[in-house]
Structures are given as C-alpha cells and as structure tokens.
Image (tube, grey):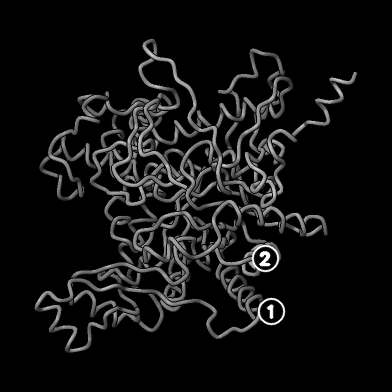
Amino acid sequence: MSWDRSNDALGTINRGDRAESGLCTLCRADCKGKCETWLASMLGRKLLYPRDFGDITAGSANTEHVGVSYNSVRIQGYNYGSGGLSDSLSNDADNCVFPNASVETAFGGKSTTKVRVPIMTGALGSTFIAAKYWNCFSIGAALVGFPLVVGENVVGIDKRSTIHGGKIMEAPELDRRIQTYLRYYEGYGAIIVQINVEDTRNGVAEYVMEKYGDQVILELKWGQGAKDIGGEIQVNDLDYALFLKERGYIVDPDPTKPEVQESFEHHGIKSFARHSRLGYTDLTSPDQVEEAFMESVAHLRKLGFSRVTLKTGSYGMEALAMAIKYSSKAELELLTIDGSGGGTGMSPWNMMEAWGVPSLLLHAKCHEYGKVLADKGENVVDMAFAGGLAREDHIFKAMALGAPFVKLVCMGRSLMIPGFLGTNIEGVFKPDERQALHANWDKLPNAVAQVGRYPEEIFAGYYDVQNKIGKKEMKKIPLGAIAVWTLADKLTAGLQQFMAGARKFKLSDISRDDICSANRETERETGIPFITDVLDDSAKKILGS
C-alpha cells in the first residue's frame, strides 16, 4: 500500500514518505511542517475539519480499502439510542452531544491508575532526542493527565551516573525525568520506568523504589514492534563509546580495537552503535520463561512496587500468548503490545520493514487470546495497543478491536512531534536560549507564521493551560508542553465525536460491534464482520415486517 503525502482538505503535507499513521517514515525534530500531527499541535481541534470554511465543500478520498491494516477497519455509526451518559444526565438530545462523551479511563486491578485521555507515550529512553525534549514531553503529559514512559538504559548511558557493584549511587538524568513529571502530576496519568537486562543488572528498580517509592510504576520489557533485538543508540565520540563499552554495553564496531580507533581518527568510522542484550537467552521453553518472569515480578513486588507492567513486541503467537497469560496470572497492572508498523529512534531500517507481526493482526489475536482466558473465568490483564497509531480514529478502532481488555492506546512518535515544534517556536522568541533549548529555527517558517505571530496566537490551547495553572506558573511552561496539550485536545475532541456517532458516551461501552471490516480479508483475519453483513439480519427483519 502507498499513502498520499498531502491532504488538500486539511491543508497538510508530509515532508517525506507517509506511513499509515499519517507521520513521515523519518520524523525530524527540525521539521518545518506540516503533517497532520504537526499542524494539530498548533491548531488543536480546528484540524478536525476541512480548511477554508465558507469557500469550499469537501468529500472523502478514503473509500478504497486494500489489504489488512487499521485503514481497512471502519467505524460504525447508529441512528438511534445512547449509552454511557453519567447518572446526572438524561438521554435526551440536549445531553447526547459529543462534549459529554467521557474519555477518562483507568488501568490496573488492585492498584488503579486513573487517566484523563486514553493515550500514553511510547518508551522514551536513551535516545538523545528523548533527553533533549524531555521537559516538553513530561510537563505536557502531566498537565493533560496521561502516562509517560521513561525507556530503557537512561541510567546506563548517563556519564554523570555512578554505579558500584550493581547499586546506583547517583542517576541525575533519571532523576530529572521522574521529577519533571511529578512536579505537575495531579492524580491522573503516571510516570513509568522501564527496565531491560542492563537496567536490572545496574539496580534501576532498587534505586527507583528507594528514592521515589510507589510514585513510580515499574515496567518490564520483553521487546517492541520496531525491532527484535535490544535497544540501540548511536554515538560519534570515541571516549563516549569506550565509556559505554566499559559500562557493559555492546558497542559496534568495538572501540577498544586499535584498528577501529585508527579508522575513527581518520574518519573512516564516524560513529558507534550501542546495543542492549536480548532477554531470556538461557531459557528454552515457555515454562522456563514463566518461572523467570514470575520471579522478576515477585522481586519487584517485594521491593515495594504495587504497580508493575510489561511491554512486549511483535513476536509470534506463542510469545503473545505467554505475555497475556503470564501478565494476567501475575496480576500486572498493564500489558502494552507493540505491533510492527510503529517507529523508533534508531532501529535497523530493514528490520523495521521486514520483521514481526503487523499491528492489526497482532491486536486482533490479543482479543482472541484474552477471550480464551475470560471464557475460562480467568483474570485478563488490562492492555494497551501500540504500533503506528497516531490519530483519534486509531484510538477508537484500537479500543474497539481489543474491547473490553484495551484501556489505552500507546503513541510513540506522534506525541513527540509537539515537543519538537513547540521548542523550535520557543527558540525563535528566546534566541539567547536557543542552544540550551535544542531549538532549530531562527525565524518562524511560513507554515507557522500563517497560524500566528506569537505563542498566544499560535497555540489554540495556550489559554486553556494558563487557566489551569495560572499566569505566574505559565511562565515556566515550555511551549512544547503547550503543544502537547493542544494536540491532546484535538485527539480528545475527535474521539468524542466518534463516540457520539457510535452512541457510546463512555469509553468502557465501546465494543467490537462499533467497528466493521472494509474487505473480506480483514474480516477473515480479525473476526470483525464485513461492513454490509453487520446488522443485515436486522435489516431484513425490518423489510419483511
């Protein structure tokens, strides 16, 4: 399948090749626009509608559905009824309006985490782009009230951290990331810290519990959708590469080899890739994996973590079944399932293109396997779906496909874009701080200048944020965080509109009946009925009455 780079109705265009998510396959921090997510980070809910109202009419171009993907799933609408309104509202036309659709959600069993909007970030770990724009991501997520994930290896790659005998003495970068979120946290959302093999060896869980206690959720990592090896970053400094090698990481090419150092000195080698290790390499059966996994969870519970989650990737059906079964048995708070089709900071490109189970197929199996457990009367872990999801229709489709098990949709690159954009705009207005901010522009590009000339005019959500925290505190809020708020407002309003059209005014009422397959292949692979078969029996009863 190929996707058009431009959308004339919305006035958006992708700088590079467009993926199904609507993002460019290569998303740049210095981008001057203007994909849908980028523009929505300024315009907010206005971007739900075609541009130039009063001078145009607009019609859909998305009526041909080829192949099996989220694009080949359509959302149902109904012409009567309502469900899920709060007890204080009656189901008359004055109350059954989309702003009354509640998008609050929660996950976890014994320890419930409330969320204002059913989204969460992907794991933002040791990639430098996550560190550069962290203030925007974390403050924005905390203000809106959705979970933010600190990814793997943050302590291990931090030159300022000190580790002795598997015990962390200092972890400045991890502290900064956690504390920035907690400063604006007000009971909705969560800060989640992910750990992998190296993090476990370094004692990250123990450090987090000792310093922050149960304010933080701990996440075990099995994998992700973008790659089937451990995480990686790229460094262009020989001393730093040697430091990472000494820290115990895999560094490629090996910076300790004399010939590699000589090649680097003469610019034949210009950078080094740091890789993490695979987990469970010494295990040979699902039973052994279960035992090791349960031991890991028990260790974290013993440390004091009441909330433990798991992130898994787009492995095959056996690994998916293990993730769902073992997470449910261990009573984890959340299982994030990341399908192929999502993004990353630095995965091998052809690995992203060629490995793993595409998101829709993987997510359809999640529901099937969850139902197997539920039908036996067993507990089923709350789930989050991830993998190339970026828009409000994606949120609705994913939650309907995985209902009733899915509580959140995990978005990676799309929730980073407002951080980039806001920072670049802020750098224009604060030229003396441009380098410290990691801003890339010295003037507003045309795509921004057409929206406004100053922040209060550029960001539709500016005064909403100011109203929430006050004028004095507003001076401390990075524009990237305001952009996160603005994008979240667009996603919220769009989701509410889909919910109202489906006559579902509460997220937990969304079901698989609210979506349909746009081709027979998708019906076969997902179990979601073909579009003209849905309620066909009811239609014929009406005709025959």
Residue at image position (52%, 38%) is: 117
Residue 63 lies in quadrant: top right
Task: Identify the amino acid type marked 2.
Answer: Ala
- The residue tagged 1 is 287
Closer to the camera in the image, 401 or 481: 401
Tell me which amino acid carries mark 1.
Asp
Residue placed at 73% from the left, 20% from the top?
80
Q: Is residue 33 left or right of residue 9?
A: left
Could you tell me which residue is drawn at 32 percent across and 45 percent down? 136
Residue at image mark 2 = 321
Q: Is residue 372 left or right of residue 357?
A: right
Residue 149: image location, x then y, percent: 45, 55
Please name whichever residue, 217 or 461, is drawn nearer the observer in this view of the structure.
Answer: 461
- Dot 1: few (<14), some (14–19), or many (≥20) neighbours within 10 Å? few
Where disc 2 sits, the SS reads helix
Q: Earlier in the sequence, mark 1 or mark 2?
A: 1
Q: Residue at x 55, y 70 (%)?
A: 303
User: Left of 489 or right of it: where is 442?
Assistant: left
- Classify the position of the C terminus by image quarter: top right
| Residue 310 x %, y % | 56, 63
452 w.r.t. 117: above or below: above
Element on which disc 1 rests: helix
Q: Which mark is residue 464?
A: none
